[in-house]
Structure formats: structure tokens, C-alpha cells
């Protein structure tokens, strides 16, 4: 089928709206008519060349829409269903999936999907001249339609606003799941959040939800920090003015129980670790996506204490279970996901959404189709 899509032709260039072709879904895939898509910093990482996805590529990975067609072996959804598209399709059969960690699926690894194909290694997108286009995160939702693996299409309740809950396809679920599923933050504990974009704000709202006593928000702009206070931060640290590790230690009595890095900066990852190592059983969770090849170091003696630093893929969520649960929490007024959405853009203004994100004018921009 023919459709409009936003194509990155070369690194560090604006996206171009083109008429492209999309193949029909295969046996275990679905065709989704897009309604809304969030604009995430991971898309911008791809534009900058920090990732391995080769251009030309159709970006977008926080999509939501309505099922229009299903493959012959699809059983979980049917035409007419409203769905969120996740960044973590999974096979359901490998050891990771069987152990309840589908976001670390061994047969559909995210690193492979960053290479620009669907989970089976093939592509569905091409230009009119037959040139293949790369997929992004096996989704490519900066387009009027998307074909995705059945496991990546999560059916949602009919009254959920897709222009809000689409953020659960990546950023919001990553932050919420990191708190609830990965770190299992305890009520009465202390938390530090390094970076207060969409993922960091989701961490803050989830930490408040589970009853964290102290929630430190660390960012470089006072306006961002004041917004973090609205999401539940109790302590604000401006990293452009103060040493965040020292400020956190001073206000928390040595360090926090949990820290979350959502910037993708290796220096900040070290700071996140240093803010928990003094706390017995402290845990630092790295959520930010640093450029491929970037490294950071930690003084080995610090591991004489019982301390953990860990990664977290897509919030370590179980998509079919957790995303509908997060939506219920939002609809019940317990997770203010709607506050993350700062502005709406038509597809034709996708470059404005990217610019506004880079300039920190918005937390999350959402593209609406047909506006």
C-alpha cells in the first residue's frame, strides 16, 4: 500500500515527508492505521548517528492506532482493536520470555532491530523506485500506517486517549517499569532521578506512586526542575550549579536507596552510581541510551559494599500485562501521563517537534494523523 512517511535520508538532516510503499503483514504481523505517535529522544539519537540503524529509515517508535488487517496466524488482536505499539516484540518461547522477561527476548533482540529490519530480518518499506527503507525499532510509526509483529501490538481499553497512552510504547513504560519491575522501589525509600525528560518524569511519577519518601530530581534547567516537582519530586538539584552527588548525599544522609539515569551520558551514569554506593543494598539503574561505543568507569573499591548497577530494557515490562495496568492507573488519576504531552503536531511538522524537543520547549511532542 502507498502512504506518507517521514524519512531520514542522511544523518543530521531534517526528515522528509515522502510517499512510500508498505507491504502487507505476514502470518504473525498486523497492519495498524496510526492515530498518534510520541517523539522520543531515541529517534533523535538515530538522526545524530548515535545508533546503528542505517538510513534511509522511517523513524518513530511510540505509536498507537487501530488494527486494520491481521496475518493468518494472528490470534491476540483483530481488525478494529485499538492498540499501543511497543518497542519490544518478543517470541514467547526463548528462556528470557519463559522466565517473564520478554523485553530481553533472545530471538527478537532489540540490538538486532536497531539494524533496521523487522524481527525476521526482512523489510516491508520501500520507495516507489523499489529502494528499501530501514525500519526503526521494528515499528516505524512516523507514517500513516505501520506493520508490526503481533506481540508488539497491545490491545487497550476503548476509552483510553491514544494521543496520551501512546507514550507507553516506549518512554513512559521504560520509566514506570524501571521503578516497579526492575528496581522494585519500596515505600519509604529514597530515589534520585538523573535527567527529567519524558523517561525521567515517568520515573518520578512512579516513585511517588509506590510511596518513595524522598525523590531527588536532577537536571540542568530550573524550569525543568519545577516541572519535576509537579510530578512528585521532593528535592530539586540543578546540576549546572551544584555537584549532584554531594547535594544528594547532604540532603539524604549519605546517599539514596535507588538512582535512575535517563540522560544517556556516561558521566551522569557514574554520578548515578556514586549517589547510591554508600547505601547498603543501593541500586543504580541505567535507562539512558549512550552513543554506541561509549564507556564509563567506576572505582573498583566501591563494590566492597552491597551495591548494584544494572541496565533495564524497556522498563523490564511484560507488555501484555503491564501496559493495560498502567493505562488503568492513568485513567484512575494515579499516573498523570497526560502531563507529559506538551504539544501536538501533524506529520508535516515533524521537524518542528524534533526542534522543540531539542530546545527543551516540550517534554513530549505527539504527532496526530489526519490533523
Image (cartoon, rainbow, N blue to C red):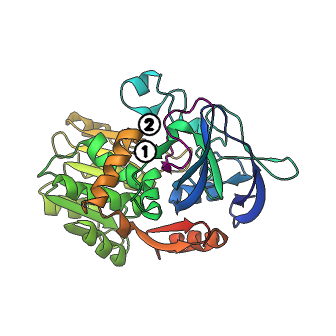
Q: Are marks 1 and 2 in contact (CB under 8 Å)?
A: yes
Q: Residues within 10 Å of mark 2 (few under 14, many from 20)?
A: many
Q: Is residue 365 magenta?
A: no
142 left or right, relative to 131:
left
Per the model, the C-alpha gap separating discs 1 and 2 is 6 Å
Q: Is residue 314 visible?
A: yes
For the point 53% across and 70% down, the residue is 358
Left or right position of 247 against 78: left
Residue 314's label in the rendered image is: 1
Above or below, 213 against 107 in this view is below
Could you tell me residue 246's position as x and y percent? 23, 61
> 149 and 68: which one is in front?
68
Whether 86 is among the magenta residues is: yes
Magenta range is 72-88
**Residue 141 falls in which quadrant of the image?**
bottom right
Label annotation for residue 56: none
User: Image quadrant of residue 52?
Assistant: top right
Look at 73% across and 65% down and name the residue there. Answer: 17
Q: Quadrant of the C terminus?
A: bottom right
Q: Label 2: which residue?
A: 103
Res 255 seen here: no
Task: State the residue in front, 201 or 152.
Answer: 152
Say few, some or many: other residues with alpha carbon within 10 Å of mark 1 (under 14 / 14 to 19 / 20 or more): many
Give how far across and how far down residue 310 sits, in percent: 35, 39
Question: At x 38% / y 45%, what residue is drawn?
Answer: 315
Q: Secondary structure at mark 1?
A: helix
Secondary structure, magenta segment, majority class: loop
Q: Position of residue 25 (x, y in %)?
A: 67, 39
Amino acid at each position: 500500500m502507498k502512504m506518507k512517511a517521514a524519512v531520514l535520508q542522511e544523518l543530521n538532516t531534517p526528515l522528509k515527508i515522502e510517499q512510500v510503499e508498505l507491504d502487507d503483514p505476514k502470518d504473525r504481523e498486523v497492519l495498524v492505521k496510526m492515530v498518534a505517535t510520541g517523539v522520543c529522544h531515541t529517534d533523535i539519537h538515530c538522526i545524530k548517528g548515535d545508533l546503528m540503524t542505517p538510513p534511509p529509515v522511517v523513524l518513530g517508535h511510540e505509536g498507537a492506532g487501530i488494527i486494520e488487517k491481521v496475518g493468518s496466524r494472528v490470534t491476540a488482536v483483530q481488525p478494529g482493536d485499538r492498540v499501543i505499539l511497543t518497542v519490544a516484540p518478543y517470541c514467547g518461547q526463548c528462556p528470557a520470555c519463559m522466565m517473564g522477561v520478554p523485553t530481553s527476548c533472545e530471538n527478537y533482540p532489540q540490538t538486532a532491530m536497531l539494524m533496521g529490519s523487522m524481527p525476521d530480518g526482512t523489510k516491508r518499506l520501500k520507495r516507489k523506485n523499489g529502494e528499501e527503507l530501514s525500519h526503526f525499532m521494528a515499528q516505524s510509526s512516523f507514517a500513516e500506517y505501520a506493520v508490526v509483529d503481533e506481540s508488539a501490538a497491545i490491545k487497550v481499553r476503548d476509552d483510553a486517549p491514544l494521543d496520551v497512552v501512546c507514550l507507553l510504547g516506549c518512554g513512559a513504560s521504560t520509566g514506570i517499569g524501571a521503578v516497579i519491575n526492575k528496581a522494585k522501589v519500596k515505600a519509604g525509600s529514597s530515589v534520585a532521578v538523573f535527567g527529567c525528560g519524558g523517561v525521567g518524569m515517568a520515573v518520578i511519577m512512579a516513585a511517588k506512586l509506590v510511596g518513595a519518601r524522598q525523590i531527588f530530581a536532577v537536571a540542568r534547567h530550573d524550569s525543568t526542575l519545577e516541572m519535576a516537582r509537579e510530578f512528585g519530586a521532593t528535592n530539586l538539584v540543578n546540576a549546572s550549579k551544584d555537584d549532584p552527588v554531594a547535594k544528594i548525599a547532604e540532603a539524604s544522609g549519605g546517599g539514596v536507596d535507588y538512582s535512575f539515569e535517563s540522560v544517556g551520558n556516561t558521566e551522569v551514569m557514574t554520578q548515578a552510581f556514586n549517589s547510591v554506593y554508600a547505601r547498603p543494598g543501593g541500586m543504580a539503574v541505567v535507562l539512558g541510551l549512550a552513543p554506541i561505543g561509549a564507556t564509563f568507569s567506576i572505582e573498583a573499591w566501591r563494590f566492597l559494599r552491597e551495591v548494584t548497577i544494572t541496565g533495564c530494557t524497556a522498563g523490564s515490562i511484560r507488555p501484555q500485562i503491564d501496559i493495560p495496568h498502567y493505562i488503568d492507573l492513568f485513567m484512575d488519576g494515579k499516573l498523570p501521563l497526560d502531563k507529559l504531552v506538551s504539544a501536538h503536531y501533524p506529520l508535516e511538522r515533524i521537524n518542528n517537534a524534533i526542534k522543540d524537543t531539542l530546545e527543551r520547549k516540550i517534554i513530549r511532542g505527539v504527532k496526530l494523523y489526519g490533523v
